[in-house]
Image (cartoon, helix red, strand yellow):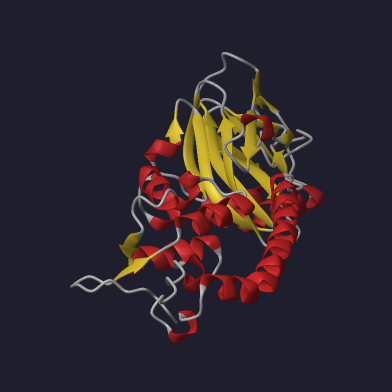
Amino acid sequence: MTENNIPGAMTMIKIDGGKVKLLRENQGLTQLYLATAVQVTTDTISRWENKRYPNIKKENGLNLAEALGVPLDELLESPTPDVSSPFNTCSHSTRFKKIWPLLLLAITIAAILGTFGYYLMVATTSIPLTAKRSLPVHCIKGQPFPVVITVTGAPTGSTALILKEELPENTTILKTLPGVNAAGLKNKKIKWLQKIEQSGVFSYLLTINDRKNENLLFDGSVAINNDSSNLLPITGDTEISLGIHHWADSNGDNIISDNEILTVYDRYSEIEELGLNIDLIEEIWLGSGYNWDQKTSSYEIFE
């Protein structure tokens, strides 16, 4: 493999910024996504693409290639032809006559590839992306309940996306999956920057702290590039009400039925790490019913 190594204590390689930019745009990726994947700044990605910093660390080059899903060779700058080669001893006129057919072929191929690249870019930016939220019908003040968002992207390959969820006031986020850092949890908002394979599940555990509003509304969006016109709203459930019934007791009859326990396992089995109290749900299901004691903030389960 030709790596265009630069001599020195640290292994450096010479990349072609134009190739990096073309690969990123054709896949609908943002500079922010590449910067996060390679662990550099977006300004550094911009400098690489504009060929202001063509020589980069080999480690960064490998991370960049992995993020773009290509071998490292495809990012390297092509070597400059050796003008001292014996094949260059003929006159300019003779050489032009010899290479004209090849030049014409190259122009034709470039035109075909350009057209293909345009349609590929259009197809990439119009990925059939959908996002659907699942919420319980109701919950109890101060008791945790799960929210699940299922995102479906391209039928083949991977899709890089930014998912934003805006939460009602007077709520507390207990945990998210995938996890986000403090910067992704601000002003009652959750922000995920992820790459999914065909589909992905995003979830969080939440509590409502008071009863100022009986019904609370959720809102969110998902995007695959920086163009705000491509923001897609999250569909599905948007509202939850406060009450005195466990969130798994969907019909509010103070019993968790067979259908309700099966729904819990079917809908939330992939997010066990979120910290759902499945043991309590099973205990209520095994009993004959339950009541919520507001004074002790606990469940009374009947045998």
Q: Is residue 119 left or right of residue 143?
A: right
Residue that protrudes farthest toward the bottom in the picture: 86
Q: Where does residue 183 sit, x and y in percent of width and height?
A: 39, 37
Is 58 or 154 nearer to us in this picture? 58
Residue that protrudes farthest toward the right in the picture: 259
Residue, x 77% and y 47% (percent of image)?
128
Q: Where does residue 82 sit, x and y in percent of width and height?
A: 41, 77
Query: Which image quarter: residue 220?
Result: top right
Q: Is residue 139 above or below residue 213?
A: below
Q: Is residue 116 left or right of residue 190?
A: right
Query: Which image quarter: residue 230?
Result: top right
Is 56 or 96 nearer to us in this picture? 96
Is 140 or 263 nearer to us in this picture? 263
Query: Which image quarter: residue 254?
Result: top right
Q: Where does residue 184 sit, x and y in percent of width and height?
A: 44, 38
Visible residue check, residue 279: no
Residue, x 71% and y 60% (percent of image)?
113
Q: Is residue 54 above or below residue 168?
A: below
Numbered-mark total: 0
Q: Where does residue 295 sit, x and y in percent of width and height?
A: 51, 25
Image quarter hosting the N terminus: bottom left
Residue, x 32% and y 61% (percent of image)?
55
Q: Is residue 169 above or below residue 299?
A: above
Is 6 or 70 nearer to us in this picture? 6
Residue that protrudes farthest toward the left in the picture: 9
